[in-house]
Image: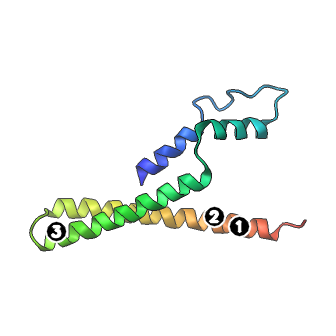
């Protein structure tokens, strides 16, 4: 999951003001920068969801391997902790998206 979040960094440049001049429109500069990276918001969110699901599957697999005696306790704990962190991150993002949607829905046209 953390690797997915690190992937979001590719959407931003090292210098936040790169490509923006006094006369340029910040919105169009940000849009141009987003198209330059080739990643969309939906793609990033989809990748994060896929990574979270894979983390949960790995945790479940490690748990079954531990029951069979094929995995150590440390491996199981690491997998479960990683899955828990992924799940908490996904829940936090979901809550933020729902809150943003509700704010937009309350706006007057």
Alpha carbon of mark 2 to alpha carbon of mark 3: how far?
36 Å
- Cα–Cα span, label 2 and label 1: 6 Å
Image point (73%, 70%), residue name: 102
- Quick one: label 1, few (<14), some, or many (20+) residues within 10 Å? few
Q: Is the residue under label 1 in contact with that under label 2 (CB below 8 Å)?
A: yes
Front label number (2 vs 3): 3
The image quadrant where one finds the C terminus is bottom right
Give SS at disc 1. Answer: helix
Name the residue that disc number 1 marks.
101
Secondary element type, mark 3: helix
Q: Give residue 32's position: percent from left, percent from top.
A: 70, 36
Question: Looking at the rendering, which quadrant does residue 61 occupy?
Answer: bottom left
Q: Which residue is mark 2?
A: 97
In the rendered image, residue 72, in percent from the top left (x then y), is placed at 13, 62
Residue in the foreground of this view, choosing between 78 and 62: 62
Residue farthest along the left direction in this orientation: 69
**Disc 2 to disc 3: CB gap under 8 Å:** no
> Which residue appears at 82% of the width and 26% of the height?
22
At x 47% / y 44%, what residue is drawn?
6
Please give the residue where the numbered disc 3 appears in the rendered image. 65
Quadrant where the N terminus lies? bottom left
CA distance separating discs 3 and 1: 41 Å
| Label 2 neighbour load within 10 Å: few <14, some 14-19, many 20+ | few
Q: Give the image location of residue 38, x and y in percent.
A: 59, 41
Left or right: 2 with respect to 95? Answer: left
Whole-percent x, y for residue 3 in the image: 41, 48
In the image, 7 versus 16, the foreground residue is 7
Q: Secondary structure at mark 2?
A: helix
């Amino acid at each position: 999951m953390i690797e997915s979040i690190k992937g979001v960094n590719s959407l931003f440049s090292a210098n936040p003001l790169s490509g923006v001049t006094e006369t340029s429109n910040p919105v169009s500069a940000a849009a141009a920068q987003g198209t330059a990276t080739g990643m969309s918001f939906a793609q990033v969110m989809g990748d994060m969801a896929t990574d979270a699901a894979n983390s949960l599957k790995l945790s479940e697999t490690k748990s079954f391997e531990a029951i069979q005696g094929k995995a150590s306790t440390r491996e199981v704990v690491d997998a479960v902790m990683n899955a828990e962190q992924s799940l908490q991150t996904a829940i936090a993002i979901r809550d933020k998206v729902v809150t943003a949607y509700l704010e937009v829905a309350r706006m007057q046209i």
